[in-house]
Image (spheres, grey):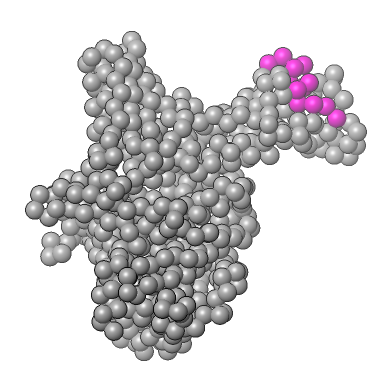
């Protein structure tokens, strides 16, 4: 810690930000807390390890890669191997999980391609599970200190939040970003500092929900503050609610329905039945705890995507984007967007992805796929529909000939006059008479910044003698903008809840401090949650379009949001059950037993 330093500005701008006068704000406070939290190194553990197959043909390279960033992979391969980008193709149509490690290019990809060129024959490399702990990044070990001041009525007067992260000797990019502290609540005096400590360990990298580290610290500290104030944790957050973005000079968010999330989430969970006194809720000898926290995650603010659509003489459409389905439902959701924008039946739309020969898309990361790729698909399909209508009304053979184009709409593969619905034509007939497919291609457009929020609630049951913690209920209610597909969105919420259980209660990469080696590079020693650890997870959504994202039909990125609140909700529930605050994650059995012995 004595070697910590503030790195140069990185992915999210400066690493030391001050608003107002934090020192004066703390002096004005009636109540102050000064707390520290630590989190260990975490690893991704996707079901499918990273794998590469490289094939050279006449100086051109094709790589089949477990990638969530095929265009980044293509660009890096071209530069490293000194090959024109046009001579590199990356294909990744299906992916067995991607949580950040498969976004950037790591040495195993470059080595495989280089060896294949040297040998003159295809080469395949699949990382073992142990290799994945050293070969493609991790979430770094962190230390956080928060000093928060508030008036007796709960109004925040100051926040100081210093996060220190492990980095390698050669890279000091910080991925555990601090937007929750900077953006979520109204606080006039703020200082957020992100520091690095260089260690002889592999480089950290992107890992799903990078804001969870800062969010866990902030939301746990606010829970501690609520007890100091004798105030309900939801009420404390409501008293510091802001509809404007403090990190953007007070500009309003596109939309923010967080208050509704608090209300509806609390109602669904039954929060009003909670006895606020620690150790007050029991079932025999079992301690019961309820905790809550706010979830918040930035989405957008990234390069967008392009898209290509072709409508055939059979009245069917093929849509292509160089994006990925990392398990989030991209195939399904983008097919839905295309069908709606084109006015075709879903069965007549084919969405193709995972090929760098398709129009560009940003890495599948930062919750950017739905707002970025969805907007691109909508733009391309809307353009193709306009072209289709123009062809129809200009065709003397069509029943819609001569009708103003703005009076023609398309539904279920049929074009009709909105004034006289009996006058109609079919997409199939129009394209067949036209004699060639109808096509449209759009270029990438920058994704506007978005902010998805929500309220998370958790119940735990603890055996104080064994130190065993069971999460028995998890509820989340979220504002993700417009919901395209409730099933895939709920699935993303469940995934975030599962990650939260692991983050809070079990996941911990162990390092031999003498040798710098990871000693549990396997799923028998690195404990991820399994089905038996997870109760039924309840997810609800406001489902109101964000007007700041008209291209993406009002949707925002969401997938990484739930974890940012659920980890603190679980930790806060453990405190409510036991009356002991465990500030060092994971909250393991030995720590619960030690806390019980202290009482």
The answer to whether any part of residue 265 appears in the image is yes
Q: Residue at x 46, y 87 (%)?
A: 153
As drawn, 429 above or below 189: above
Judging depth in this view, the residue of 392 and 495 nearest the camera is 495
Q: Position of residue 496 (x, y in %)?
A: 45, 55
User: Does the magenta-highlighted stretch encompass residue 98?
Assistant: no
Q: Residue at x 26, y 17 (%)?
A: 117
Q: Residue at x 29, y 48 (%)?
A: 524
Judging depth in this view, the residue of 592 and 356 nearest the camera is 592
User: Does the magenta-highlighted stretch encompass residue 434?
Assistant: yes
Q: Magenta stretch: give its range.
A: 424-436
Image-quadrant location for residue 319: top right
Residue 18 horizontal side relative to residue 432, left or right: left
**Which quadrant of the rendered structure holds the N terminus?**
bottom left
Image-quadrant location for residue 271: bottom right
Residue 596 horizontal side relative to residue 261, left or right: left
The answer to whether any part of residue 363 appears in the image is no
Q: Position of residue 442 (x, y in %)?
A: 56, 32
Q: Position of residue 517 (x, y in %)?
A: 15, 47
Q: Position of residue 465 (x, y in %)?
A: 32, 74
Q: Residue at x 56, y 47 (%)?
A: 488
Residue, far front: 284
């Amino acid at each position: 810690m004595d070697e910590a330093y503030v790195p140069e500005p990185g992915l999210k701008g400066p690493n030391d930000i001050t608003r107002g006068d934090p020192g004066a704000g703390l002096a004005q406070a009636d109540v102050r807390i000064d707390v520290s939290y630590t989190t260990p190194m975490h690893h991704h553990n996707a079901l499918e390890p990273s794998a590469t197959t490289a094939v050279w043909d006449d100086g051109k390279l094709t790589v089949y890669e477990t990638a969530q960033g095929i265009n980044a992979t293509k660009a890096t391969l071209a530069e490293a191997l000194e090959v024109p980008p046009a001579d590199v193709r990356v294909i990744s149509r299906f992916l067995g999980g991607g949580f950040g490690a498969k976004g950037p290019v790591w040495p195993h990809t470059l080595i495989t391609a280089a060896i294949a060129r040297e040998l003159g024959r295809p080469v395949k490399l699949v990382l073992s599970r142990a290799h994945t702990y050293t070969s493609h990044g991790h979430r770094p070990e962190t230390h956080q200190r928060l000093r928060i001041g508030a008036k007796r009525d709960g109004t925040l007067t100051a926040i100081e939040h210093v996060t220190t992260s492990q980095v390698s000797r050669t890279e000091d990019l910080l991925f555990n970003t601090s937007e929750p502290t900077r953006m979520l609540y109204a606080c006039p005096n703020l200082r957020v500092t992100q520091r690095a400590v260089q260690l002889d360990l592999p480089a950290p990298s992107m890992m799903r929900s990078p804001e969870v580290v800062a969010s866990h610290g902030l939301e746990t500290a606010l829970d501690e503050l609520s007890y100091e104030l004798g105030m309900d944790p939801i009420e404390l957050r409501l008293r510091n609610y802001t509809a404007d973005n403090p990190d953007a000079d007070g500009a309003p968010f596109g939309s923010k329905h967080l208050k509704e999330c608090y209300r509806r989430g609390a109602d669904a969970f039954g929060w009003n039945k909670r006895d606020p006194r620690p150790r007050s809720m029991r079932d025999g000898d079992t301690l019961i705890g309820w905790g809550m926290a706010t979830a918040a995650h930035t989405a957008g603010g990234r390069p967008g995507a392009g898209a290509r659509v072709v409508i055939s003489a059979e009245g069917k459409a093929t849509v292509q984007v160089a994006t990925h389905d990392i398990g989030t439902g991209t195939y399904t959701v983008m097919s839905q967007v295309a069908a709606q924008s084109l006015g075709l039946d879903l069965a007549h739309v084919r969405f193709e992805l995972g090929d760098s020969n398709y129009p560009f898309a940003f890495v599948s990361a930062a919750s950017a796929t739905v707002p970025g790729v969805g907007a691109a698909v909508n733009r391309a399909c809307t353009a193709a529909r306009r072209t289709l209508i123009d062809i129809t009304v200009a065709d003397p053979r069509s029943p819609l000939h001569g009708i103003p184009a703005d009076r023609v709409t398309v539904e279920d593969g049929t074009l009709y006059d909105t004034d006289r619905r009996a006058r109609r034509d079919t997409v199939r007939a129009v394209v067949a008479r036209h004699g060639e497919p109808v096509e449209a291609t759009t270029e990438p457009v920058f994704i506007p910044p978005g902010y998805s929020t929500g309220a998370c609630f958790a119940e735990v049951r603890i055996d104080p003698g064994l130190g065993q913690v069971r999460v028995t209920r998890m509820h989340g209610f979220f504002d993700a903008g417009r919901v395209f597909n409730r099933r895939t969105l709920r699935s993303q919420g469940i995934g975030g809840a599962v990650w939260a259980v692991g983050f809070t209660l079990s996941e911990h990469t162990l390092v031999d401090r003498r040798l710098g080696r990871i000693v549990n590079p396997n799923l028998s020693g690195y404990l991820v949650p399994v089905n038996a650890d997870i109760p039924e997870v309840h997810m609800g959504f406001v489902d109101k379009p964000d007007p700041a994202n008209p291209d993406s039909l009002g949707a925002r990125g969401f997938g990484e949001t739930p974890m940012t609140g659920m980890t603190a909700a679980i930790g806060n529930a453990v405190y409510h059950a036991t009356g002991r605050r465990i500030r060092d994650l994971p909250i393991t059995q030995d720590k619960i037993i030690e806390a019980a012995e202290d009482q």
